[in-house]
Image (cartoon, grey):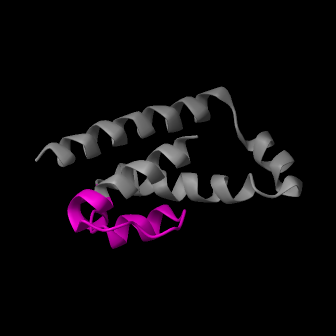
Amino acid sequence: MCHQVMEKLLKGYYWHILKEEPPYIHNLLILSKKCEIFDIMPDTYKNLINTLSPLNIQTRYPGDKERLLNTLNEKFCMEIYSQTEDFKIWIMQLLKK
């Protein structure tokens, strides 16, 4: 779900800045670059993109789902959740400018 939150926030930012429909893609890295936020994004959020992107892809394929579940633990998931919440606050502040 954190991937989807970040994707929707980036698409909202895209629309706000570029005044056009965001591309129908799910790749957070491409979205962040297309809406020209990547270069001002703190490294923590760039790292979050790198963490979330493979998780989103792997959940779409049943064979990979079991391996993915084995890599997740409560601490790791809470870190991702917390970073996603921080990203939300950061991007919402940019939208208010």
- Asked if residue 88 is positioned above or below residue 11 in the image, the reply reads above
Q: Position of residue 7 (x, y in %)?
A: 47, 53
Q: Position of residue 22 (x, y in %)?
A: 39, 66
In the rendered structure, the answer to whether residue 82 lies left or right of residue 65 reads: left
In the rendered structure, the answer to whether residue 43 lies left or right of residue 30 reads: left
| On-image quarter of the N terminus | top right
In the rendered structure, the answer to whether residue 35 lies left or right of residue 77 reads: left
Residue at point 37%, 64% (across, down)? 32
Q: Which residues are magenta?
A: 14-41
Give the farthest residue toward the right. 63
The one nearer the camera, 16 or 87, is: 16
Q: Position of residue 56 (x, y in %)?
A: 64, 54
The one nearer the camera, 32 or 83, is: 32
Give the farthest residue toward the left. 97
- Asked if residue 34 is positioned above or below residue 37 in the image, the reply reads below
Residue 97 included in the magenta stretch of the image: no
Residue at point 29%, 55% (across, down)? 13
- Asked if residue 34 is positioned above or below residue 89 in the image, the reply reads below
Residue at point 80%, 41% (across, down)? 70
